[in-house]
């Protein structure tokens, strides 16, 4: 027990500077920590944070998974009609290859319109089934593609199927990214009809929670052309503001790095 306490304190000295201010401000002096407190603080510094709810009152973060795909620009156009911002969690090679000229343009159009682009990792594989090296590859290949296409590395990542564990949180933390889940699911990916998805949105709107972090998928035409307009109209009537995930979490930076986008070459392939 004494040894583990010493190790925890040693790690704390190394990692304290990496902790967010809102954590360190609530932490007592190291000498006053119990062993469990010290180990808990180390864990919080080495595991990526997981966000399943927004924190800014009266906001809705509408998110779209599994793209870029055919209906991406339709979604962007609909969001514009409602003065809404959304967040696109994109894959590298799921429904289609992100490097195709069509998908390159879709991602650029969404980004230039002010929407947040985040990672859904490369091939939509379940994180909990992957080795750390394989998961790191799934993350970095997507980050590389977005750096080439947009010149950004996203600060947020969503695990396919919403599945993660401590091992995958460690990989995400090492990659500098926070994990985003959701607290509302439109149900489009599990076969709900348009009417059923619209009912889900009606029900959550009537409950009027302080915030909503909504899961949708841009790979369904009915989501893009029917459910989304209904959701935006219904939630707008309740007075919500439609923002990106980064904004709904208090104005966090959506990107870890920004640089000049690359030029298409032979490496732009899946």
Image (spheres, rainbow, N blue to C red):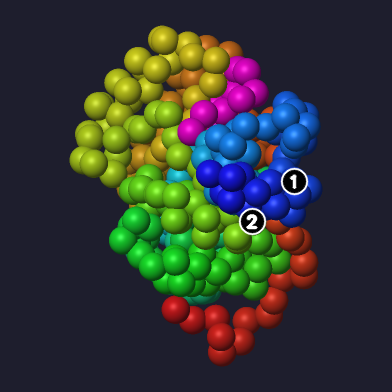
**How many angstroms separate mark 1 from mark 2 (CA)?**
15 Å
Q: Are marks 1 and 2 in contact (CB under 8 Å)?
A: no
Does the magenta-highlighted stretch encompass residue 77?
Answer: no
Residue at the bottom extreme, as displayed = 266
Q: Which residues are magenta?
A: 52-61
Label 1 sits on residue: 16
Please tell me whether mark 1 or mark 2 is closer to you in this view: 1
Where does the image place residue 61, in percent across and percent down from the top left? 55, 32
**Direction from residue 138 to residue 22 in the image, left or right:** right
Between 151 and 19, the one nearer to me in the picture: 19
Residue at 71 percent across and 71 percent down: it is 261
Q: Quadrant of residue 240?
A: top right
In this rendering, the answer to whether 62 lies above or below 6 is above
**Direction from residue 111 to residue 270 in the image, left or right:** left
- Is residue 98 shown to the viewer in this render? no
Between 187 and 238, the one nearer to me in the picture: 187
Label 2 sits on residue: 176
Q: Main secondary structure of the magenta part?
A: loop
Residue at 46 percent across and 45 percent down: it is 64
The C terminus lies in quadrant: bottom left
Where does the image place residue 179, in percent across and percent down from the top left? 52, 46
- Is residue 57 shown to the viewer in this render? yes
Where does the image place residue 200, in percent across and percent down from the top left? 32, 23
């Amino acid at each position: 027990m004494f040894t583990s306490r010493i190790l925890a304190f040693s790690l704390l000295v190394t990692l304290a500077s990496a902790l967010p201010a809102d954590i360190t401000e609530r932490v007592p002096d190291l000498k006053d920590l119990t062993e469990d407190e010290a180990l808990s603080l180390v864990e919080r510094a080495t595991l990526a944070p997981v966000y399943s709810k927004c924190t800014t009152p009266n906001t809705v973060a509408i998110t779209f998974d599994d793209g870029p795909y055919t209906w991406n620009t339709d979604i962007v156009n609909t969001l514009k009609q409602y003065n809404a911002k959304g967040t696109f969690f994109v894959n590298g090679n799921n429904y289609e290859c992100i490097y195709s000229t069509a998908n390159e343009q879709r991602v650029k159009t969404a980004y230039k319109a002010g929407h947040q682009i985040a990672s859904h990792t490369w091939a939509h594989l379940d994180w909990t089934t992957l080795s750390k090296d394989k998961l790191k590859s799934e993350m970095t290949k997507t980050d590389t593609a977005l750096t080439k296409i947009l010149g950004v590395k996203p600060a947020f990542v969503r695990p396919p199927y919403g599945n993660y564990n401590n091992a995958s949180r460690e990989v995400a933390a090492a990659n500098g990214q926070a994990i985003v889940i959701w607290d509302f699911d439109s149900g489009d990916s599990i076969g709900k009809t348009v009417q059923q998805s619209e009912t889900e949105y009606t029900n959550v709107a009537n409950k009027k929670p302080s915030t909503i972090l909504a899961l949708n998928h841009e790979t369904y035409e009915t989501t893009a052309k029917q459910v989304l307009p209904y959701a935006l109209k219904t939630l707008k009537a309740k007075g919500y503001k439609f923002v990106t995930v980064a904004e709904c979490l208090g104005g966090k930076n959506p990107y870890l790095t920004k640089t000049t986008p690359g030029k298409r070459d032979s490496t732009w392939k899946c």
